[in-house]
Image (cartoon, grey):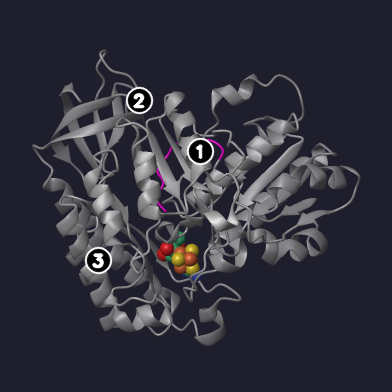
Amino acid sequence: MNLTRNSILSHDIDESRQGLAYEDEWLVVAEGKKFYIESYGCAMNFADSEIVASILRQENYVSTRIVEDADLILINTCSIREKAEETVRKRLKDFNKLKRARPGTLIGVLGCMAERLKDKFLEEEKLVDMVVGPDAYRDLPALIATAEDGGKGVNVFLSREETYADISPVRLDSNGVSAFISIMRGCDNMCSFCVVPYTRGRERSRDPFSIEAEAVALFERGYREVTLLGQNVDSYRWSNEENVNSPGIASVNFAQLLERIAKIHPKLRVRFSTSHPKDITDEVLYTIARYPNICDYIHLPIQSGNSRVLKLMNRTYDREWYQERVEAIRRIIPGCTISSDIITGFCTESEEEHQDTLSIIEWADFIMSYMFKYSERPGTLAARKYADDIPEDVKKRRLSEIIHVQRQVSHRHNLRDLGKICEVLIDGDSKKSKEEWKGRNSQNKVVIFSKSPEYKIGDYVNVRITDVTSATLLGEIVNTAS
Ligand code: 5AD
Ligand code: SF4
């Protein structure tokens, strides 16, 4: 899942995913204990932190950006690569130093690391007072009470039902323009490298009415872009039998959900992440093509360009299948951009197979990719079945080759936009200059342009592209967008 946002409290482990800053509205809550939360990993985790913030608000907790002021320090963790775990352990040690200066402060670990490392963190290393799994956030108030009484607050139970559908997230995103909406939880795929099915449990879809209500409420508050989040959005399926509060609809699939959200308002942009190449349907593609406010951009992780490696990864598609899906995207949504996740140095990957990954980046014309070295995760299929046999220096070299090719492909793609006019949703100041705004076009490219007094953050503007880098388009406003 892709993210590029300004970060204050959230820290990016892979440097490709950035975090969320607190909304001022949150700060008006007057009194109460203070909590501080740091989030790591994917967009789902950031969305979960917003649910946690909402649950804590009910308990009269207020947020603080200053960790030294906090009565409760939470760290929302990611397990996807080993490096993520190391970072969290280091942060917990920092927090424990603060706790020594301020006894009574509680420290909690939330999210994906909870299950695997609960004993280590609680008993062996005594780094935390609470360990709370991704499906146990409703239990936080009780766990805090246990910890306040000197006990250990632990709940790592993984649910088959929990979707937090009724919890209205406290928006930790300060730009007031774009927000995440979690539409499902867990994952039923068994990609052999991936720890997510173990840490987040079985896949379940949230009811479409609560998703729609959340999107409507955001639009009414001035938000202009929602990103529907799930580990595998294409397998979203909600059906009536299993759910209450379902006025007359038997079932809703992802294409139908997209359509419902797109219909809320033409000025509400709809994005989604992540799509799985085995599940993305033509119905979804035709729905994107039909609604101008569903963005022409698909994050479609390939992981490897080689069919043998894909089989070992248990991705259940091969190179040709992926190519066919890309051709369908090109045919049904001309101009749609595609991005990817890529893992290099997976077990037994040969040089030739690595070349297949380089060539698919070229062939698929990805506008960008999140690129990783394979990191063996305990308990996964790959850890049990295959040796992690690609030496670290080879992994590193292959990764830098992949990054190099991707950069060239991104630059080439951007050069084709020179002179074009695109509609951009202004979402903030550019990082480099207060005189400039930044925003994204429908294809998810970041566009930078000079400010104009006629417009404000949250407006759509037409921008002519006058220059490009491999990461950004630069341009000038030409007139009001429709
Ligand atoms: N090692 C490296 N990268 C991984 N990912 C998931 N598991 C691993 C792992 N064990 C990557 C995949 C996935 C993204 C979210 O993280 O590319 O799509
Ligand atoms: Fe992990 Fe595969 Fe599920 Fe993505 S689809 S979360 S990579 S198991």
Please report the bounds of the magenta region as a residue range. 1-9
Q: Find residue 292 and report its image quarter.
A: top left
* Residue drawn 35% across the image and 67% down it: 399
Q: Which residue is mark 1?
A: 20
Q: Amino acid at mark 3?
A: Arg
The local secondary structure at tag 1 comes to: loop
Viewer can see residue 200: yes
Q: CA distance from mark 1 to mark 2?
A: 17 Å
Which residue is identified by label 3? 325
1 vs 2, front mark: 2
Q: Are marks 3 and 1 in contact (CB under 8 Å)?
A: no
In this image, 421 relative to 240: left or right?
left
The amino acid pointed to by label 1 is Leu
**Reading the chain from its start, which is encountered first: label 3 or label 1?**
1
Quick check: 376 above or below 412? below
Q: Nearer the viewer, residue 338 or 86?
A: 338
Q: Nearer the viewer, residue 448 or 385?
A: 385
Residue sitting at the far right: 149
**Label 1: few (<14), some or many (≥20) within 10 Å?**
many
Q: In what element is the residue under mark 2?
A: loop
The residue that disc 2 covers is 458
Q: Residue furthest top?
A: 453
- Residue 331, by quadrant, is bottom left
